[in-house]
């Protein structure tokens, strides 16, 4: 019975340590994606509704706030993924690509203002500035999803194996006790 409880606790520990960490990483990747999508939407608000300087400032500030949230979430994700893994390389790459995208948006904002808030000029200046970051983010989310599935399957396999071992040991102990 004690052996069975020990094996069960190992399975629970594996679930808590491995599976929940992978789930948290995958969720954080989704959070990065959501913040990034909102930042892009705020950029579009700048272009479409930014003729009025007050609205322009409001939407640009909202864009910068969301980009800051993207960067903060990437830093949190960086701590969650193991060093030396594909996911770690993608997080580092994403951080660099996001910095480039942010610089691209700042340049596009200046071009937009220089063109007397012409949305077409701002849109053209921002064209493709975030593409690499978006592609890297998609690769990272795919890698995190695969890692989550693998950890879940591994924990499930360990759980089933632990249950079988525990039952066999208890049956053996019961059989030996009956013989004795």
Image: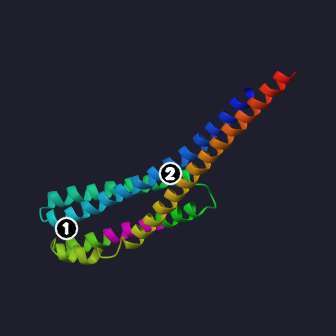
State which tag comes first along the sequence, 2 or 1. 2
| Circle on res. 27 | none
In this view, the residue in front, 85 or 147, is: 147
Q: Is residue 58 left or right of residue 140?
A: left
Residue 28 position within the rendered picture, expressed as x and y whole percent measured from the top left: 45, 51
Residue 106 position within the rendered picture, expressed as x and y whole percent measured from the top left: 32, 68
At 84% from the left and 26% from the top, the residue drawn is 176
Q: Which residues are magenta?
A: 96-105
In this view, the residue in front, 128 or 52, is: 128
In this view, the residue in front, 157 or 36, is: 157
According to the image, label 2 marks what residue? 25
Tell me, yes or no, whether the two marked residues, 2 and 1, touch with CB atoms within 8 Å.
Answer: no
At 25% from the left and 61% from the top, the residue drawn is 41
State the predominant SS element of the stretch in magenta.
Answer: helix
Badge 1, how many Cα within 10 Å: few under 14, some, many 20+?
Answer: many
Which image quadrant is residue 53 in? bottom left
According to the image, label 1 marks what residue? 47
Residue 42 position within the rendered picture, expressed as x and y whole percent measured from the top left: 25, 60
> Distance between the Cα atoms at labels 2 and 1?
33 Å
Residue projecting furthest to the right: 180
Q: What element does badge 2 sit on?
A: helix
The verdict on residue 98 being magenta is yes
Q: What element does badge 1 sit on?
A: helix
Q: Is residue 88 left or right of residue 115?
A: right
At 15% from the left and 73% from the top, the residue drawn is 116
At 40% from the left and 52% from the top, the residue drawn is 31
Residue 99 position within the rendered picture, expressed as x and y whole percent measured from the top left: 42, 66
The verdict on residue 5 being magenta is no
Q: Is residue 139 left or right of residue 123?
A: right
- As displayed, is residue 149 above or below residue 49? above
| Disc nearest the viewer among 2 and 1 | 2
């Amino acid at each position: 019975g004690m052996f069975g409880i020990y094996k069960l606790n190992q399975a629970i520990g594996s679930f808590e340590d491995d599976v929940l960490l992978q789930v948290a990483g995958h969720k954080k990747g989704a959070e990065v994606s959501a913040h990034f999508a909102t930042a892009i939407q705020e950029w579009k608000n700048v272009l479409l509704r930014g003729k009025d300087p007050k609205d322009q400032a409001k939407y640009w500030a909202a864009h910068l706030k969301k980009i800051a949230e993207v960067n903060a979430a990437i830093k949190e994700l960086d701590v969650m993924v193991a060093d030396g893994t594909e996911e770690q390389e993608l997080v580092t790459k994403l951080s660099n690509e996001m910095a480039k995208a942010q610089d691209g948006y700042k340049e596009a904002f200046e071009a937009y203002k220089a063109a007397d808030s012409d949305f077409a000029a701002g849109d053209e200046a921002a064209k493709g500035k975030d593409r690499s970051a978006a592609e890297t983010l998609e690769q990272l989310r795919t890698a995190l999803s695969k890692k989550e599935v693998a950890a879940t399957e591994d924990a499930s396999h360990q759980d089933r194996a632990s249950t079988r071992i525990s039952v066999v040991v208890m049956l053996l102990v019961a059989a030996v006790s009956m013989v004795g």
